[in-house]
Amino acid sequence: MSKINQIQNALKELDGGAFQKLADSYLKKKGYEYLIPLGSVIGSNKVKKGTPDTLAILPNGKYVFVEYTTQQARLVEKLTGDLNKCFDEIKTGIPVAKIQEIVICHTSNLDASEFHQLRKNCEAHSVNLNIFDIGLISYDLLEKYPGIARDYLGINVDTGQVVPPDEFVNLYSKNKYATRLDTDFIFRDDETKSISYAIENNNLVIVQGKAGVGKTRVALECCVRFTEIHSEYKTLCIFNRGLDIFDDIKTHFSEPGSFLILIDDANRVSKFEYLVQQLQYKREDQQIKIIVTVRDYAIENILKASKAYGEAPEIVVQPFTDEQIKQLVENEYNFRNYHYPERIANIAQGNPRLAIMAAEVVKEKNTLESINNVSNLYDSYFASIHQDLDEIDDACLLKVAGIVAFFRILDRNNETIISAIESAFGLTPKEIWEAINRLHYLEIIDLYEDEVAKISDQVLSTYLFYLAFFKKNSLDFGKLLERFFPTYRERLIDALNPVMNIFHSEALMEAIRSHIDKLWDKQIHENNEEDFLFLLNDFGLLKQTETLVYFNKQIRALPITQIDLANLNFDAKSEASLPSIFSILGSFQNADDDNFKIALGLLCDYLEKFPEKLPDFLYIFINRFCFHHTSYLYAYSVQQAVVNVLWERTRKGENLLFSKVFLIVAKEYIQTNFRNYESKGKHAISYINFELSPTIKLTELRKTIWDSLFCLYKVHSLKDEVIEEIHNYSILNNEVSASKIIEQDASEIIPFLMRELSPENFKHCFLVQTYLKKLENRDIPVASSLKERFESKIYCFYDLLTSDWLERHTLELSYEEYARYKKDEIEKYTSQYKLEDYTEFFKQCAEIKLNISKSIQAHSFQENIITALISLAERNSKLYSMVLEYYLDQSDPLNFSKYHHQLLVKNLIEVSGIEETYLILAEASHQTKRDWLFDYYEYLPKSEISSERLYQLYDLYNNAESRELPTNWDYLLGYQAVEPEIISKEALIKLFIPVLSTKLSVK
């Protein structure tokens, strides 16, 4: 029976008292506040006589009368009688004029004529009528208020996967093989602060890290702390039972309010995207925040699912140090033998979950031999499973356990999966579900509603997968690959990744490799290119030589392409669908050095044959091969290889494509602070903020980059790009801790500046002075002669016309005082200027503007140009008029902003009068002419407004482009003296519509 039928049948079975209680809750959800249940007996489902059954008091002082009935026969007569009682002022004691609305809730149906009859009765008394029948109520209970269906009708609409934190901890701990969540919370101050800050300022936060590092524990603690501060928030946790969570979401998040949702192991939650949609489509009366935990190797899928909402901050939970692991187990287990914490720390390798598992084993067996390695630790921790399976002596049990571990969830109704399992492993559906029932009895597998099987604890799931497919070889891993790869490749990676990390051994790797070899040969023979690429993508590192040979052959077969640099997109952007040559060869940064260099060479070969793939090429070289926070441990070998291979391809600037690629990659590599999202090997992913460590190898790498850039400067077409590269470096906001690296860079950069740049070139002066300020801010010494050499006349002019916060700080002036100081300095400098001086003034300004357009000083530069011109207007109105006329004759070369040229026009009107101003503006012929003319009509004094000026304004609107129209219409009020209806709807349409469609005809 469907849920809606269950709800409707249950409603019909309610007696009057029970229905009144349900309907009161229902109306409260519908927004009827201050309900007084006059007809209900408190504490029971009995009813008492009276009218109305329930009274609601409205904020305006009026009332809502509510009548309930479960009567089926002669319903309209019953309801008519109830309405008449409501209108009986003697019976109710309330004047009819004070009744705003009558609500009727019933468990039957009315036809249209009956409904109309009741409504006419209410309309006769000027009272609104609202009727909620069984259809409307039942669907609301199903879709909006399933909590009412559960509480009053005993009908569960959800699956019990959304629970409060205390219940989540209890459910988590019920599995006898799960590690505890109730340990002391220690050593996580940094992560807690980061997560707490993130959730304060974002609605979606992702907490990632390796399996067992304590993501769930940290996230739970942050939830507790958040709700202590924000008591209006209700925390709910997602406990994954393997069932579709859609109904649960409807149940728990259909109400108004503020919710903090913890989604643990989000990649394993069925339909995770439903929860993200709660953020996208939340109601106006809701506030929703979500904390997600996810293992590092599964982060990509969560990022994809979250992408629809937007970028979410990611916090990485790092492993503990050995000392922290020791203190953790000492606090929890009070070991007196100091060897125990030592050995546990050695085994755990910073993993709190492994540490707790090891401590539990040591506590039970009181011997270190039980945990001499990770594999033995798992064997000891799950020894009871071994014992149970050995005693039963049924090989089918371990097979089925391994299968459930792989699929995460096994649904009895999914015939496709069950059939595929039978085909691959020879297990019939009957055998599978008999085994699942026995495993459920042994508390190894959880079984929900006798339909869905799941292993709740991830550690146990990993162990059973390893046990079934590798240690005991109960199942053939090759058949798993052959039948389920690549369709279930994500599940395969999810299952295999922790096995390879935890139980890593040469024997295990060889076992996996042998199966890969067979599948490799099979797909080559079948010429199944798509599946073969997936195989290379996921397992190419196990067959490095063969993978490189394959791509070398593929690339050589591609035709040679004529490269047109002008049509190439130089934006680093990942556009290739997986799998691709970029994802496969990109993983070779985890291969040995020689093979990685070969992979880089192949990627370069591919780019030459397929230049349209440049965005993908740049993306992988910048995002995947860039610095990692552990790069210093490997002597920056990946980045050195990238730089060497790319530089070789530039042929010292002869190859323009690779020269430009080198410039783009170098721009990223010469930074000192990074926040990278990149592969960490074996499908693990990291996202972390860090600074480079100033090692000898880093110094050598940066010297190589700088020397290469300076070599490219000798190529005429690349000079400006190299200058821009150094300028971008000069304005980087490096951390103070990077000063040592910056000082080392200076030993390479300063000789280049002195050798190659000219003080006669403003761009060069600007670059040198910007770079020297970077060094000065970090107290890095440099010869004063360099600064003096590049203080050219035009640079000093630039310095005059820009505001410098450092100068303001040195002079100890307030913002207003500094503005006056700059104005005085500019006035002194220009006080003797004649017209010819201003022609040079504008020429120099144009050159400066061209070279500082991307600088933060561009705004203050334009501000101070205006200051200089306004000062001229105050000092010499005639010269000001001549200067502005000259400037406009040059076609507005500085392209002043709207605000700035308004100031100039306003002053021109004041000092030269409206006629001369109009002539100057109207006779000019430049692209921004109409912008300046609109300023004229905006600042025209009211006393000077005439019909002639109005028609000129009409004509200006008639010829203007939409982008030129003023956004402030208030100035039109001044034209009312000439045209009283100027701001009427019709007049505005007359003004503006022609600009967007047809031209205005002025008569």
Image (cartoon, grey):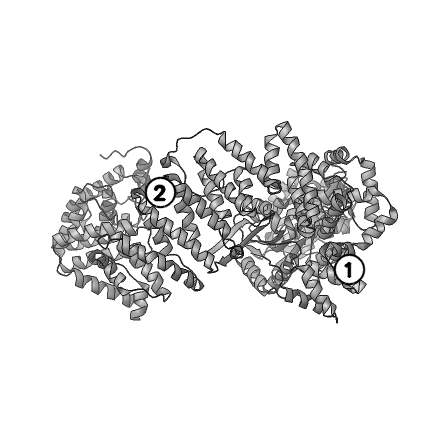
> To which quarter of the image does residue 234 belong?
bottom right
Rendered view: 652 above or below 330: above
Closest to the observer, 581 or 975: 581
- Give the labeled residue for mark 2: 653
Apparent side of residue 448 relative to residue 977 in the rendered image (left or right):
right
User: Would you call the spot at circle 2 few (<14 residues within 10 Å), some (14-19), or many (20 or more)?
Assistant: many
**Residue 775 shows in this picture:** yes
User: Looking at the picture, how far across and down is residue 182, in whole percent?
Assistant: 71, 63
Q: In which quadrant of the rendered image does the C terminus lie?
A: top left
> To which quarter of the image does residue 923 belong?
top left
User: Looking at the picture, how far across and down is residue 992, in whole percent?
Assistant: 32, 39
| Residue that extends furthest to the front in the rendered view of this protein | 594
Nearest to N terminus: mark 2 or mark 1: 1
- How far apart marks 2 and 1 lie (CA) works out to 63 Å
**Residue 813 shows in this picture:** no
- Give the labeled residue for mark 1: 370
* Disc 2 secondary structure class: helix
* Disc 1 secondary structure class: helix
Identified at 48% across, 59% down, the residue is: 691
Disc 1 residue type? Ser
Q: In which quadrant of the rendered image does the N terminus lie?
A: top right
Disc 2 residue type? Gly
Closest to the observer, 588 or 255: 588
Apparent side of residue 631 relative to residue 996 in the rendered image (left or right):
right
User: Looking at the picture, how far across and down is residue 939, in whole percent?
Assistant: 23, 51
- Give residue 639's mark: none
Apparent side of residue 884 relative to residue 59 in the rendered image (left or right):
left
